[in-house]
Image (cartoon, rainbow, N blue to C red):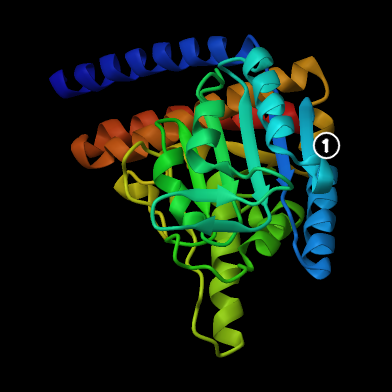
Amino acid sequence: MVIAAQVGGRVRRSMKNLLALLFLAATAFPSTYYVNIGGLGGQEDYAQRFQSAIEELDKLTKATPDAKVLSAAGANATHARIKAILEEVAKTATEKDVVVVTLIGHGTFDGETYKFNLPGPDFTARELAQWLLPVKAKRQVVVNTTSSSGGSVKELQRDGRVVISATKTGTERLAPVFGRYWLEALRDPQADADKNEVVTALEAYRYAEAKVTKYFESNKRLATEHPLLADTAGGEGVRVPDPSKGQAQVALRTPVLLLGSLQKAAATPEKQQLLAQREAIETQIDRLKLRKAAMPSDQYRVELRGLLLQLARVQKELDQ
C-alpha cells in the first residue's frame, strides 16, 4: 500500500508537470528560421552544384509551415550579407523558435582556424559563432557540409545548439558527399524513422551518415570523410550518437523539417497547438526513458502508460 501510494503521488506530480509543459507549449507554435548559405564554388562544376543545392534547400525548407527562409548564394553570399542575415534573425527570433543554419560550399582549415569560402573575405567559425551569440532561439542547428568542416565544431559548440559536420577534423579536405545525403534526408520520408512526420536533426543526421558509409563501402573506397554530431558545449562530436547514453538529446527533439500531412496541419492554429502538445509529451517520454534504470519498474510502467495515453489522444485529434 505504501509503495502504491508513493507511485501514485509521483504519477500525480508527473502529470502536473506534464500539464504545465502542455500549457507552455500550446501558447505559441515556434517559427523555424532557415539560413541557407551557398559559398564560392571555384570551378564551374562546383559552382553549379552548390547553386543547385541551395535552390533545392530553399524549396524544401519553404514547405515547412511558419518557415522564414533567408538564403545567400554565389555572388550574393558575401561576408557582409551573411552577417546582416544573422543580425536580422537575432532581432526577430524568439526563445521558442528554431534556427537552422546550413553551409554548402568549400571550407579550409590551417590547423587553427576554419574558414568558409566566399566571394571576397571569408568568414571563420569563430565569427559565425559570434553572429549566432545574440540569437535568442534555444534550439539551434548548424549543418556544415563543407570540406574541413570538422575544424569548425569546437568554435560553434554551445549548449542547446546541434553542430553537424561532414568531416571529423579540419584535415579531411576532400569535397564531401555528406551534403548530398543531408538534402536527401530532407526529401526522403524514410529519414523520418519514427514515422511521426517530423524529421529531427538526429534523424536527418543518422540518415545522411548511413548513406555516406554505404557510399564508400559500395564504391570500395577508403572513407575520406567521417561525419560528426555534437550538441553540448565542449563535448566531443560523435559519429553514431546513442540517446540512451545521454548523447544527442538536443538533436533528438529539434525538428529540421515537417513532412506530409503535418505541413498542412500545422498551417492552422488549432493543429499548431496539438503539435506543440505532442512534442511536449514526446519530450516527457524521452526523459522518462532516461530515468528508467533508476526507477522502480512499477512506477516506470505506470508513468509510461499515462504518457502514451496522452499521446494517443493528441494524435487522434491531429488525425481528424
Q: Is residue 30 visible?
A: no
> Hey, which residue is sitting farthest bottom in the picture?
220
Q: Is residue 265 visible?
A: yes
- Measured as percent of width and height from the top left, residue 77 is found at 76, 41
- Measured as percent of width and height from the top left, residue 51 is found at 83, 54
Between 69 and 287, the residue placed more toward the observer is 69
What SS does tag 1 mark?
helix
Q: Residue at x 44, y 27 (%)?
A: 306
Between 269 and 162, the residue placed more toward the observer is 162
Q: Residue at x 67, y 22 (%)?
A: 89
Residue 301 occupies which quadrant of the picture? top left
- Measured as percent of width and height from the top left, residue 213 is found at 53, 74
Q: Residue at x 37, y 33 (%)?
A: 287
Relative vertical location of residue 176 with respect to residue 130 in this rendering, above or below = below
Relative vertical location of residue 109 with respect to residue 220 in this rendering, above or below = above
For the N terminus, the quadrant is: top left
Residue 62 occupies which quadrant of the picture? top right
Determine whether, in the image, residue 298 is placed left or right of residue 96.
left
Of the residues shown, which amino acid type is indicated by label 1? Lys
- Measured as percent of width and height from the top left, residue 75 is found at 83, 45
Relative vertical location of residue 111 with respect to residue 55 in this rendering, above or below = below
Determine whether, in the image, residue 292 is placed left or right of residue 202.
left
Q: Residues within 10 Å of mark 1 (few under 14, many from 20)?
A: some
Q: Residue at x 22, y 34 (%)?
A: 295
Q: Which residue is mark 1?
A: 62
Between 218 and 77, the residue placed more toward the observer is 77
